[in-house]
Image (spheres, rainbow, N blue to C red):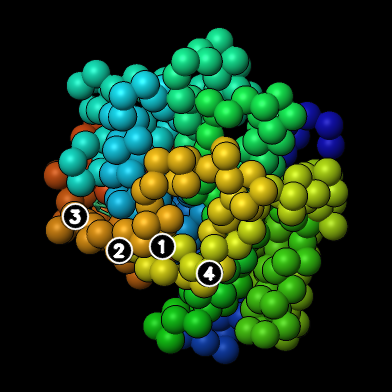
Amino acid sequence: MKYATEFRNPAAVAVLLKAIAASAEQIGATRTKPVYIMEICGGHTHSIFRYGLDKLIHDGVEFIHGPGCPVCVLPMARVDECVEIAERSGVIFTTFGDAMRVPGHRKSLMQAKAAGADIRMVYSPLDAIELARRNLDRDVVFFGLGFETTTPSTALSIQQAAREGLTNFSVFCNHITVPEPIRALLNDPDMTLDGFIGPGHVSMVIGIHPYDFIAADYGKPIVVAGFEPTDLLQSVLMVLTQIAEGRATVENQYARVVPEHGNPVSLAAIADVYERRPSFEWRGLGEIDESGLRIRPRYAAFDAEEKFGIGYATGQRNVPEVEGCACGAVMTGKMKPPACPQFGKGCTPEMPLGALMVSSEGACAAYWQYAGARAAAE
Ligand code: SF4
């Protein structure tokens, strides 16, 4: 296969759906509930709804939407801290666009910008570096946000700033890691997951072996997957096949993109610039040990927490979420978005109450965009 359209071929999709149905029926003969498969990555959630895979797939399989959207798991306290930095005199605060509308307790970055803060959307941390070069009398702060997919580019920007001695550039580091929240989910006694679809882009960086514990310690299969319909369906079939055969291992459906041992250049940049925080707060999941990264002391001059004396550097954490928001239950697969009392009422993509409605990768926004449109059409 060479082109994206080949991964959306209806005949290939039909063959996979038939094989999934046969496998689900075989497994279903020995149990009363569906096979619960969590797609960890928000990009997969988006694809599942975009292509209607949740409707096409056999009733014996149910997708559970995981916490793999970095904007969605960002706790409100961190948004508040972004606003606090951005409102300081002399600061140019830079961010990816999808973080602009995440609600904070006082305001979102978008509202802070409307009120006069100098907040600019960028496509890369290197854009922020360029801004710093051109504004030597201002403090340019980049909002480092995301999983292992975006972590290396932030690391490279810090290394670049260090090489240039660009001390008016710093990073507000909120980078997080994928394997630790999966362990936290698996340790939840209420969790009834049977297997996982592993994230494709993150695994490009870290490879497939950081997930070994899922199979070895918890006996659950995980298949790293691509983002097209046949990718996802083939991955579901691979998970079901493992369950049917009584196996649990890490498999790589996305081998055309994901190297087994990850990307060595990215991994070296990550190791050079970051160290693990003892714990980090996740929206809906609480504090998770060693799930967040901070900037190493040798790069402290580029650490916005140190420079501005806020956030984890001062111990301010666990600010409560907005009342009535069920993001935590949705993110842990305990509730589907339409079951949230705020869905489509107090919370819409235009006026999001929770972060899952902000990003296109959030489960609530995906339901609203695709499942909502389908329901209206029906
Ligand atoms: S509908 Fe809004 S408040 Fe409810 S879970 Fe989704 S994002 Fe959170």
Q: Residue at x 71, y 24 (%)?
A: 164
Answer whether labels 1 and 2 touch (C-beta < 8 Å): yes
Disc 2: which residue: 318
> Does residue 309 appear in this view?
yes
Query: Label 4: which residue?
Result: 278
- Using the numbered discs, state the Cα–Cα distance from disc 3 to disc 2 in whole angstroms: 12 Å
Viewer-nearest residue: 212 or 247: 212
**Within 10 angstroms of label 2, few (less than 14), some, or many (20 or more) residues?**
some
Residue under label 3 = 322
User: Which sits earlier in the primary sequence, circle 4 or circle 2?
Assistant: 4
**Which residue is identified by label 1?**
281
Contact, CB < 8 Å: mark 1 with mark 4?
A: no
Callout 4, which amino acid?
Pro
- The secondary structure type at the circle numbered 1 is strand
* Of marks 3 and 2, the one in the foreground: 2
User: In the rendered structure, which amino acid carries the disc numbered 1?
Assistant: Glu
- How many labels were placed on the picture? 4
Mark 3 Cβ inside 8 Å of ligand 1: yes
In which quadrant of the rendered view does residue 84 lie? top left
